[in-house]
Amino acid sequence: MKKIIFWGTPEFSLPSLEALVKLDLVKAVVTQSDKPAGRGQKLNISPIKKYATEHNLFVLQSDTLDEAFVNELKQFLPATFVIVAFGKIIPQAILDLSELAALNIHPSKLPILRGPSPIQTALLEGFSATAVSLMQLDAKMDHGPILGQIEAKIEPTDDYLSLSHKLSQIGGELLSENIIPYLNNELKAIPQDDTKATICKLIKKETGIINWQTPAVNILNQIRAFIAWPKSSASLKDIEVKIEQAKISEMKLNPAEIKILNTQLFIGTSTYALEILKLQPANKKSMAAAEFIRGYQSKI
């Protein structure tokens, strides 16, 4: 049986790696270098490295993917590359080392939402469903032929964290079903229809700033999409906050107008007011609206 070199870094990659380990296909794992994090700048180990170490898998780490890395990688060839949220662009010269065409798990219904933010964009756009695609990598971004897709419903209560978890599990299922047929050359790759392609944008910190002049549903979708990063930020009078949970009310207020009713906090939009359920003032912990009102009512 042919073997796999798995490329991945965050929690999203884990179900895919677990699926391949269960099939005893993994020859080595490539993940990003340990990064300093927090006040103490302690080195943070990626979820993939942690899992790989616990399961006695060979781990390769590099941020530069330089000649020394390539020489180390070549020790584990021949093998086919499976890439799931590695987090860096892999040069074509390295992808060409894959025994069969390298595979990628992409969390959208390709060719829809090619690009760096498919999960956030599906939430921002108010999609009721999305999918996970298994594709062969080629020289263009998220352009390669499709080997399999599984659709997923987006619940009104889903945010980036819950939807990302759901899609990561589906990614593992997709690989479980398709990887052995692929390694045996039994799968047909179907080219994407480029005429149906849409591209999603790179999310920047300033993308999270709330514009209260927009409809409530747009702001709610933004809060859902950006719950992990950059979060949805706003100024309530002079208090900087990140809004983490909200719902659309039946109240009408002027855009950005604040109203407090007992333990409830409402902010106006261009349509209905949003009731803010959970928020985080600058340099403070997350809190429910009632706790925020107790501490900050005199300031807003």
Image (spheres, rainbow, N blue to C red):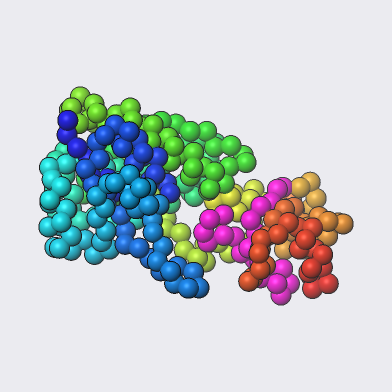
Residue in view at x 57 percent, y 46 percent: 159
- Residue occupying the point 47% across, 63% down: 204
Q: Main secondary structure of the magenta part?
A: strand
Give the x, y percent position of residue 82. 26, 42
Q: Check the image and report above or below for 296 versus 128.
A: below
Q: Which region is colored magenta?
A: 227-248
Q: Is residue 297 visible?
A: yes
Q: Position of residue 132 (x, y in %)?
A: 40, 37
Of residues 124 and 3, the one drawn nearer to the viewer in this rendering: 3
Of residues 44 and 145, the one drawn nearer to the viewer in this rendering: 44
Q: Quadrant of residue 172?
A: top left
Task: Measuring from the top left, give residue 74's x and y in whole percent.
Answer: 12, 51
Screen quadrant of the C terminus:
bottom right
Above or below — where is 278 with respect to 162?
Answer: below
**Quadrant of residue 44 in the image?**
bottom left
Q: Is residue 124 visible?
A: no
Image quarter of residue 131: top left
Rendering coords of residue 169 (x, y %): 44, 37
- In the image, 114: left or right of 75? right
Horizontal side of residue 225 vs 300, given as left or right = left
